[in-house]
Amino acid sequence: MKNIVIATKNKGKAKEFQSLFQPFHVQVLSLLDLSFEVPDIKETGTTFEENAKIKAEKIASILQTTVLADDSGLIIDALGGRPGVYSARYAGESSSDQDNINKVMNEMNAVLPKDRTARFVSVIAVAVPGQQTFFRKGTCEGEIALTESGTNGFGYDPIFIPVGYKRTMAELSAEEKNNISHRTNALAKLEDWLASNWLKGE
């Protein structure tokens, strides 16, 4: 079985990627699985693409192997696109998922149901030493719930209702979420690369 390194220390995100890569018979290693400590990479970009590239290229340079990095976030139309690239630290640098959810829900308190449209965005950067980094982008459209609900998933899942559902992402099973998620949609665009290049060892 082939291995690929995902540039994340987020256990929830690593678990999702493990499920997403399983059909390709690829074992996912997060930065938590390595035998040494990888320094935290500062996400100084202003776009998902820039942040994903920074993480992928720096970790690939350290490990000298193929590294996949995902930068993802929640875009809310009524908030002018916030929290966007600052989704993981929307309520502050050391904020928890709950802190971030609380801030969003407070800001959305007076927004009518018809105006609560939002989407999750995932940009995947693949860095291969000696080659040019490339990107794939996926989205999941939906809306911000009126109340928080569900205990599955992580991040903003308890307040995001995907299009076609009446439940939040955190109320869906892992299988249901993986069928529609922004990461799934981004990863689907990597299938050709997986099948024709990397999995053949090129």
Image: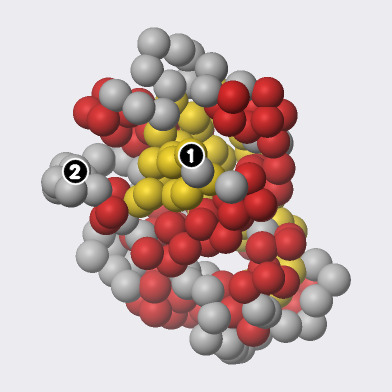
Secondary structure found at label 1:
strand
Tell me the residue that label 1 is attached to: 2
Coloration mode: secondary structure
**Residue 81 at x, y = what percent?**
58, 52
The percent position of residue 143, horizontal first and vertical second, equals: 71, 69
Please name whichever residue, 31 or 134, is drawn nearer the observer in this view of the structure.
31
Q: In the rendering, at what x and y percent does residue 86 appear?
A: 41, 52
Tell me the amino acid under the disc marked 1.
Lys
Quarter of the figure with residue 123: top right
Quadrant of the rendered image containing residue 131: top left
Q: Is residue 122 left or right of residue 34?
A: right
Secondary element at image label 2: loop
> Within 10 Å of the Cα at label 1, are there few (<14), some (14-19), or many (20+) other Cα atoms?
few
Residue 38's disc number: 2
Look at label 2 and name its amino acid.
Answer: Val
Q: How many marks?
A: 2
Image height check: is 159 above or below 28? below
* Image spot of residue 128 (x, y percent): 43, 21
Q: Which residue does the image show at 67% across and 79% down from the upper left? A: 172
Q: Residue furthest top?
A: 130
Comparing 55 with 50, the one in front is: 55
Q: Nearer the viewer, residue 84 or 139?
A: 139
